[in-house]
Image (spheres, helix red, strand yellow):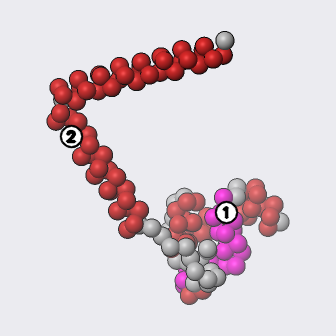
Amino acid sequence: MFRTVLLYGAGLALAVAALQWVEYQVWARSHPGELYSLLLAAAFLGLGVWVGARLFRQSPPTGDFVPNEAARASLGITDREREVLGLLAAGRSNKEIAQRLAVSPNTVKTHIARLYEKLEASRRTEAVLKARELRLIP
């Protein structure tokens, strides 16, 4: 019984494949311009992805992270604010940061507000991005 089902299934699959091939042949003959445009677009898409991957490949950081103490000092970021910034970059919530640093959530909010001012950011992601650009955090 199982063999019969497999044979019928294989036969139907071959029939469907043959019908699809015939339909493709008819479509390709009646619309050659669209087919060539599609192939050309696919080739340029592949080329663009390959060139983009080659040009914008980022090499992994070498060696240990060395924070930019000059930028930290010029911005006036304290050690505690740097700790909060590191935990922000790790994706921690205000409550998690407060628990980790043994302070109240309001204190964390104050530190974050000061970091926003010092980094001239309006959101967490923007603050973390600017801190990474300035090499304040890894």
Label 1, label 2: how far apart the Cα atoms are = 49 Å
Left or right: 15 with respect to 127? left
Task: Identify which residue is drawn at 63% across, 64% down.
Answer: 89
Give amino acid for label 1. Ala
Give amino acid for label 2. Tyr
- Front in this rendered view, residue 112 or 85: 85
Q: Which residues are magenta?
A: 71-91
Q: 133 above or below 18?
A: below
Q: Which mark is residue 73?
A: none
Q: Nearer the viewer, mark 1 or mark 2?
A: 2
Is residue 73 at all visible to an observer of this figure? no
Q: 101 above or below 62?
A: above
Density class for disc 2 (Cα within 10 Å; few <14, some 14-19, many ≥20) is: few
- Front in this rendered view, residue 4 or 56: 4
Task: Identify which residue is drawn at 56% across, 76% down.
Answer: 61
Is residue 98 a member of the stretch shown in magenta?
no
Q: Position of residue 71 (x, y in %)?
A: 54, 83
Q: Which mark is residue 36?
A: 2
Q: 32 above or below 23?
A: below
Q: Which residue is mark 1?
A: 90
Tag 1 near tag 2, CB within 8 Å: no
Left or right: 67 with respect to 95? left
Q: Main secondary structure of the magenta part?
A: helix
Q: Position of residue 34 (x, y in %)?
A: 20, 35
Locate the N terminus by quadrant: top right
Q: Position of residue 42 (x, y in %)?
A: 30, 46
The residue most toward the bottom is 70
Is residue 45 at all visible to an observer of this figure? yes
Is residue 89 a member of the stretch shown in magenta?
yes
